[in-house]
Amino acid sequence: MANSPIRVLIVDDEILARQRILDLLAHERGVEVVDTAENGATAIEAIRTKQPDLVFLDVQMPGMTGLDVVREIGPDAMPATIFVTAFDQYALRAFELAALDYLVKPFDDERFEQAFRRARQLIELREMGKLREQLLAVLQQSDDEDRVTPRPDATEPYLERIAVEQRGKIRVVPVEQIDFITSSGPYAELHTGDRTHLIREPMHVLENRLDPRQFIRIHRSAIVRLGLVDTLHRGAGGDYEVQLKSGLRLPVSRSRREELERRLGVMP
């Protein structure tokens, strides 16, 4: 194996994420990328037909998750694996307990090199029995939880900053600068003044990690800073909107209206 290139498969539903790993691997010696895959089903086929030595495997993919791919292939047949994940507290605990390597988006070059170096060593030392034990441990923990989802933790501090990747660079956005957040498919858009930052993060994860004294979720697709709410508009059809101090209006779902009114001090 030491004299043969490491055969790598990249699995991620985001084309930019796949390209970033491709770019980073281009700087590594002795690497052959055998294929890329954008979903779980394609990944399973590629693992079985291309027989890679190493898989970069996205955890949060629509339809079939990364752990579903491992279940389908089976820990005994799974190549060395580096999981790639957006922030997911339960997933990170599972990987850490099993001593499996993972990358949290957005990751920097140094963290990537560290994970790849460990994987290369595991492959060259042929420690696949250890890998199977690690994968089994993660699958057992995820089965106990039914699925990999973030869980609120009362002891975990609220977010003070959020890392976003822009054009290959990582920028840190202080939470105190965020006016409101909206969803855009699998992404969330952080709105700070006249700027918008795109991150791959479910809204319910952000809702759980933001200080409820400062933010409130008013709709499945919107979280706002309470201090910026100026007016609550009640429409004739029973629809509600909040108007921020900037003049922007956002919809309020009926199920969240009472909580919003309570937080705003609106008397019944």
Image (cartoon, rainbow, N blue to C red):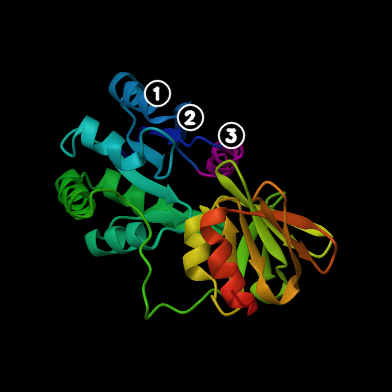
Q: Residue flagged by tag 2: what amino acid is it?
A: Glu
User: Mark 2 and mark 3: span between their CA atoms?
Assistant: 8 Å
Which quadrant is the N terminus positioned in?
Answer: top left
Residue 228: image location, x then y, percent: 75, 72
Residue 98: image location, x then y, percent: 23, 59
Residue 55, located in which quarter of the rendered image?
A: top left
Viewed as shown, does residue 253 lie left or right of 151? right
Residue on which disc 1 sits: 42
**Relative vertical location of residue 102 with respect to residue 55 in this rendering, above or below:** below
Q: Which residues are magenta?
A: 15-28
Residue visible at 30% across and 42% down?
67
Q: Residue flagged by tag 1: what amino acid is it?
A: Thr
Viewed as shown, does residue 43 lie left or right of 106? left
Residue 47: image location, x then y, percent: 32, 27
Residue visible at 55% across and 66% down?
258
Instruction: Look at the image and say whether residue 69 sits in the magenta stretch.
Output: no
Depth order, front residue of 98/21: 98
Q: Residue flagged by tag 3: what amino acid is it?
A: Ile
Residue on which disc 2 sits: 38
Residue 46, located in which quarter of the rendered image?
A: top left
Proximity of marks 2 and 3: CB atoms separated by less than 8 Å: yes
Residue visible at 17% across and 45% down?
132
Mark 1 falls on what kind of element? helix
Residue on which disc 3 sits: 15
Disc nearer the start of the sequence (3/1): 3
